[in-house]
Structures are given as structure tokens and as C-alpha cells.
Image (cartoon, rainbow, N blue to C red):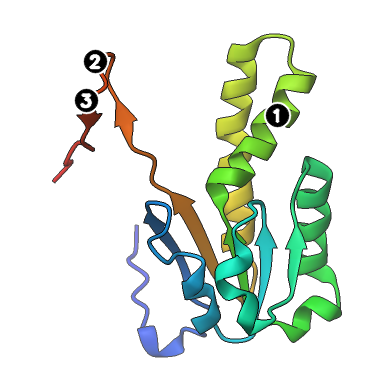
Amino acid sequence: MAINLKRTGTLASNGVKFIVYGPSGAGKTTLIKTLPNPIILSAESGLLSIQDSNLPYIEIASMEDLTEAFQWAAGSEEAKGFDSIALDSISEIGEVVLNYEKKVNKDARAAYGALSEQMTDIIRAFRDLPSKHVYFSAKLEKSQDEMGRALQPIDAG
């Protein structure tokens, strides 16, 4: 097999794709104001922190809303006018997906399996939108054990 050596100088910018993960109140939504020319896909009711910025948003309350928003972002002339897409938050979008899957799957375990597959597909689809900066926010929820003690995340490093 021959090695195909390439150079980074030939790469074209396809937008910055990133996720911000933190607890409620950390400023994840406020950070959206710093994005270049953003549109927000909002699945939570936490946009008051950026009310003064008067940013456009699409409310995501169902799978139909999410599907329509993606199709709009991927193919509409209007969406071409935005440089950034902010999904606020993928944690809440996951809840939308899970609610949908529970309705179509009789087995709750199958719904959770479908949730994992759907979220992977959704995140990749938005990540791969050409020429767009894509911002994902995700909530950090504190977990407790059966005694009510806070559980710390495992350090994989």
C-alpha cells in the first residue's frame, strides 16, 4: 500500500465544530452571543440570559421540529444567511428523541438503544453541515448514590 502524503495548506475551512459541557448556570447559553451570526435551535426554556441580544431561534419540542430544523439548516436559502448554528442543548434534544422513541417502541430498552443511535446520527449530521460553525451545549447533571452522596465523574486520564 502506498502512503498518500497530503499537506494542510490545501485544506479549506469547514467551520468550527465544538461542544460546551457544564452545569446549569455556567454560561453555556450566554456563550452563544459570541458566535458569528448565529441561529439557535433551542430545546430548553433557558434563553432569557441572551434576551438582550435579540438572536433568532427555532424551538425544538418534537422530533418533527428537529427534522424540519435540520432540513432547513442543510438546504434552505434562508439558512445560508447564518454563519453559526447553536444547539441548546443536546441534553434536552436527547429528551425529545427519547420521548419519541418511547412512543414508537413498545420495549423501553429498545427505545434507549434507539436513542443512542439517533443522537449519534443527529450530532454527526449537524457537525457535518458544510461551511457552518456548529455549537453544541450539554448539561452536566450531578449524580447521587443511594445514600444521597454526590458522585464524581471518573477521570479517564
Q: CA distance from mark 3 to mark 2?
A: 6 Å
The image shows residue 113, relative to residue 95, as above or below, that is above
Residue type, label 2: Met
Residue 33 location in percent, x, y? 54, 80
Kind of residue indicated by mark 1: Asn
Residue 144 tag number: none
Tell me the element at label 1.
helix
Circle 2 SS class: loop
Q: Check if mark 1's residue and mark 3's residue have beta carbons within 8 Å.
A: no
Whether 41 is drawn above or below 43: the answer is: below
Q: Considering the numbered disc 3 on the image, is that residue within a helix, a strand or a loop?
A: loop
User: On the rendered image, what quadrant is the N terminus found in?
Assistant: bottom left
Q: Is residue 135 left or right of residue 5?
A: right
Residue appearing at x 63%, y 45% in the figure: 93
On screen, 21 above or below 82? above
Residue at 56% across / 54% down in the picture?
Answer: 89
Dot placed on the residue nearer the N-terminal end, 1 or 3 = 1
Which residue is drawn at the image coordinates 71% and 21% (left, top)? 102
Instruction: Name the residue nearer the viewer: 86 or 126.
Output: 86
Q: Position of residue 43 (x, y in %)?
A: 66, 51
- Looking at the image, how many numbered discs can be counted on the residues? 3
At a point 34% along the width and 64% down the height, the residue shown is 2
Residue 149: numbered disc: 3
Location of mark 1 (residue) = 99
The residue singled out by tag 2 in the image is 147
**Gap between marks 1 and 2, in whole Å?**
29 Å
Q: Are marks 1 and 2 in contact (CB under 8 Å)?
A: no
Q: Residue furthest left?
A: 157
Packing grade of label 1 (10 A; few <14, some 14-19, many >=20) is some
Q: Quadrant of residue 77?
A: bottom right
Contact between marks 3 and 2 (CB within 8 A): the answer is yes
